[in-house]
Image (cartoon, rainbow, N blue to C red):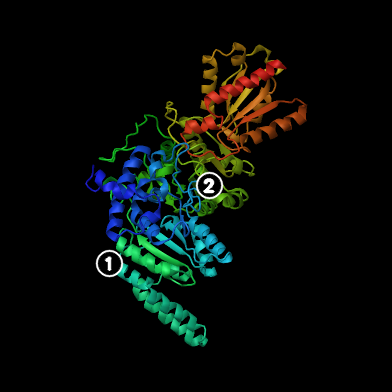
């Protein structure tokens, strides 16, 4: 075990007696520092058993302690952005004994959640929401007379790149709403640390005399002639510029305090106390510098690796999870895009701060100029790609399904309406496991299928994924998207050249053998993407359960390949000897099933032949964290659940 992480049980006595922040508000600074060490040790040992977002949480230990020490939480409202960094917060607010349940079914969420604790004032999962939410709370406090309650938002430098954060700051500055925004800069992406001098200046600028003098100056300005007032304001800005430098936040209407060493409890506590006492009628931004993975050497040396981890060995930092020999879908994306770019340099790829998560890190190793990272700015990424498409480039936007929700207007207005050939690669479609409801790729089908001009695909395995990506490259008639699940592929053989994909053409995997099919006695299992394999496994379960030969002979399994356009020719042909269609998709209602309903209805109006349609899709509830297999079971989409559903439909058929 690294020397900076101790397991000496004698050092656990402080943390063991802390169940809420008021339990340590009487501590000396020396005790707070010891608490920080204990908290890191306990957190590393806990996350090693459960997995989770460790690096960011290690980086905010001192900041979390200082915030709860200085402010009267939960009366004072502390709003965390995203939630990746909230493990110390959870442990100090009555949840340390539940950390062994982190990200597990019925356990602690990996993010903040209003229903989990009175100390969680706003749920998180996606980034850049904290300032907007906190501003709303601060305005509500003003209107309801609770002006003594402080509101503090904590946001990272990466999340600050999103437009939502700037919109909120602009509004806060305009409203002059008293609140505190803490910018946790852990990647040196905004400004470099400048050491003890900056800390000293921060304490000086946040002190009561300085703040009081500044407010007095503001008040006095109102009584002076416009020309003199303007010169005095310039002088005040010049003096402050010498100390902190003119910066963007000042122009947005914030009082800027920074930089502060986010691991120096003496300075953090002093600055926060000054800010708490402030009577400024304007928002304050405190800029702190922290280090991801602080205090645990493996995490400090590999911040990206320890952003999100599976179970690992504490001493070495090495993962304990068995490595699969099957490639991940994400790696297939990276390899396939690399193949395409090697032959066509007009292909460009775009990511919103997720190159590793979307496979574009693989592309960047060979073709760095063809990978464009726009930061946490999904809206911009989509319209940015649209602009490229108007000038002859072939843009691929690689993004998690759940994050596409943040750019839906841009997809509609800037891409679909203009019929621009932008290619969307939607990773993590369907259930994602431990990250829970905020990260499931549940709604992409329901969002995109109603949009004119859109083509939407989903592969049954990794070989088909590769083929579809190659197909997308040459499709230039309008926008096109592909969705696929998180995790490893099926381990199928990968052909030297990708198979040919035909627009709108489905694939029959297993054909019904029922001789009486002409009477409409057969069942079509029309599966999309990941559900092809799950449905195939369901058919194997039926066989193992000694289901009747008649039932097994009635089943036709179809790989839809395309959610839009559907293979209407195949559907029309199958209607001749199939009386029931069952659609299966790992997405919300309003997806494939809605498309099939429209198609069958149109055909029925044409020839009068009515077909029964049933659907299996995600239920109308948010399913929280659990294993992906468990989530499929809860959604009635596991192979066993599908097998049971098929049996139920068959029983209803033969009773007629």
Answer left or right for 518 relative to 382.
Answer: right
Q: Nearer the viewer, residue 339 or 213?
A: 213
Answer left or right for 573 relative to 271.
Answer: right
| Quadrant of res 535 | top right
Residue on which disc 1 sits: 196
Return the disc, 1 or 2, that comes first in the chain's sequence: 1
Q: Nearer the viewer, residue 548 or 452?
A: 548
| Quadrant of res 215 | bottom left
**Residue visible at 57% across and 41% down?**
443
Image coordinates for residue 285, horizontal then vertical, percent? 43, 65
Residue on which disc 2 sits: 404
Q: In this view, does 640 lie above or below 438?
A: above
**Residue visible at 65% across and 35% down?**
595
Q: Nearer the viewer, residue 116 or 211?
A: 116
Image coordinates for residue 73, horizontal then vertical, percent? 44, 57
Q: What element carries label 1?
A: helix
Location of the N terminus by quadrant is top left
Q: In this view, does 179 lie above or below 21?
A: below
């Amino acid at each position: 075990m690294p020397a900076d992480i101790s397991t000496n049980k004698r050092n656990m006595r402080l943390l063991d007696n802390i169940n809420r922040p008021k339990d340590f508000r009487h501590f000396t600074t020396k005790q707070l520092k010891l608490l920080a060490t204990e908290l890191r040790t306990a957190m590393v040992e806990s996350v090693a058993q459960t997995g989770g977002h460790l690096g960011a949480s290690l980086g905010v230990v001192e900041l979390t302690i200082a915030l709860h020490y200085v402010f009267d939480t939960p009366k004072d409202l502390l709003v965390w952005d995203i939630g990746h960094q909230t493990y110390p917060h959870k442990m100090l607010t009555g949840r340390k004994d539940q950390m062994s349940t982190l990200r597990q079914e019925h356990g602690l969420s990996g993010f903040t959640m209003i229903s989990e604790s009175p100390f969680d004032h706003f749920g998180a999962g996606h980034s850049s929401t904290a300032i907007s939410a906190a501003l709303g709370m601060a305005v509500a406090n003003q209107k309801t007379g609770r002006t003594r309650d402080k509101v503090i938002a904590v946001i990272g430098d990466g999340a600050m790149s999103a437009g939502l954060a700037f919109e909120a700051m602009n509004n806060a500055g305009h409203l002059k709403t008293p609140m505190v925004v803490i910018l946790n800069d852990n990647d040196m992406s905004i400004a470099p640390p400048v050491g003890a001098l900056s800390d000293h200046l921060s304490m000086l600028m946040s002190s009561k005399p300085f703040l009081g003098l500044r407010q007095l100056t503001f008040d006095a300005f109102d009584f002076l002639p416009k020309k003199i007032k303007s010169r005095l304001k310039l002088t005040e800005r010049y003096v402050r510029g010498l100390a902190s430098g003119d910066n963007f936040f000042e122009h947005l209407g914030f009082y800027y305090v920074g930089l502060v060493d986010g691991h120096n409890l003496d300075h953090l506590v002093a600055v926060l106390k000054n800010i708490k006492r402030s009577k400024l009628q304007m928002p304050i931004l405190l800029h702190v510098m922290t280090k991801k993975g602080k205090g645990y050497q493996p995490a400090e040396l590999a911040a990206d690796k320890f952003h999100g981890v599976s179970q690992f060995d504490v001493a070495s930092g090495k993962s304990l999870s068995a490595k699969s020999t099957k490639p991940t879908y994400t790696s297939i994306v990276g390899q396939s895009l690399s193949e395409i770019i090697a032959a066509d340099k007009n292909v460009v790829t775009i990511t919103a701060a997720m190159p590793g998560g979307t496979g574009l890190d693989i592309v960047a190793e060979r073709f760095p100029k063809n990978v464009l990272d726009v930061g946490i700015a999904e809206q911009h990424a989509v319209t940015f790609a649209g602009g490229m498409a108007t000038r002859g480039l072939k843009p691929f936007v690689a993004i998690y399904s759940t994050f596409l929700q943040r750019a839906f207007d841009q997809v509609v207005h800037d891409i679909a309406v203009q019929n621009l050939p932008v290619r969307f690669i939607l990773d993590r479609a369907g259930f994602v496991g431990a990250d829970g409801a905020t990260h499931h790729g549940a709604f992409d089908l329901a969002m995109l299928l109603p949009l004119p001009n859109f083509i939407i695909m989903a592969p049954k395995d990794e070989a088909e994924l590769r083929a579809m990506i190659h197909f997308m490259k040459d499709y230039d008639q309008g926008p096109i998207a592909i969705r696929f699940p998180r995790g490893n592929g099926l381990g199928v053989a990968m052909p030297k050249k990708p198979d040919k994909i035909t627009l709108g053409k489905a694939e029959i995997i297993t054909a019904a053998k029922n001789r009486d099919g002409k009477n409409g006695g057969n069942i079509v299992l029309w599966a999309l993407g990941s559900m092809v394999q799950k449905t195939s496994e369901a058919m194997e379960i039926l066989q193992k359960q000694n289901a009747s030969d008649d039932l097994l002979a009635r089943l036709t399994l179809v790989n839809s390949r395309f959610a839009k356009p559907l293979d209407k020719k195949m559907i029309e042909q199958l209607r001749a000897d199939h009386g029931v269609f069952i659609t299966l998709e790992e997405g919300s209602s309003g997806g494939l099933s809605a498309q099939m309903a429209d198609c069958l209805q149109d055909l029925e109006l044409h020839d009068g032949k009515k077909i029964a349609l049933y659907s299996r899709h995600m239920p109308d509830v948010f399913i929280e964290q659990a294993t992906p297999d468990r989530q499929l079971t809860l959604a009635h989409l596991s192979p066993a659940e599908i097998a049971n559903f098929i049996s139920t439909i068959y029983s209803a058929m033969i009773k007629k």
